[in-house]
Image (cartoon, helix red, strand yellow):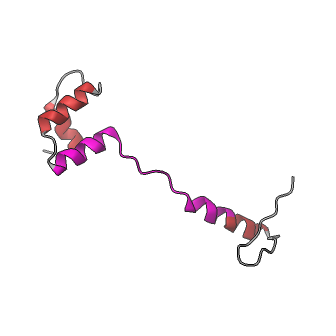
Amino acid sequence: MTYYYYIERGNTPITNAAQRQELKMKTRNSKKPFDIPSFSESLKKDFEAGTIELKESAIEFHKANWTAFIDIEYTKKQFGIK
């Protein structure tokens, strides 16, 4: 199977393997994965923004089955609070 790669400017075929690899890297690097925060990061952002309190965050960790009970100390550890 033969693939032909074309440069956008002049539509000339790329025959050099190094040029082909460079083109692949440019297209591969242009696609970035989604930056979706994890559950704990999302709770931390809400806590830092002041929309929820520490106890509410601990309840959310418990509801999400991250803890067996409402654990304030675990929540502080996850948020980096001493």
Q: Quadrant of residue 69?
A: top left
Q: Position of residue 61 (x, y in %)?
A: 24, 31
Q: Quadrant of residue 76?
A: top left
Residue at 61% across, 59% down: 28
Q: Quadrant of residue 11?
A: bottom right
> Does 49 sit left or right of 34 as displayed?
left
Tell me: residue 61, above or below residue 68.
Answer: below
Q: Position of residue 8 (x, y in %)?
A: 71, 73
What span is colored magenta in the figure? 24-49
Residue at 20% across, 39% down: 77
Seen from this angle, which residue lies furthest bottom? 10
Tell me: residue 53, above or below residue 16.
Answer: above
> Does 67 sit left or right of 33 as displayed?
left
Dominant secondary structure of the residues highlighted in magenta in the image: helix
Residue at 18% across, 49% down: 48
Seen from this angle, which residue lies furthest right? 1
Residue at 24% across, 48% down: 45
Q: Position of residue 18 (x, y in %)?
A: 74, 69
Residue 62 magenta-drawn?
no
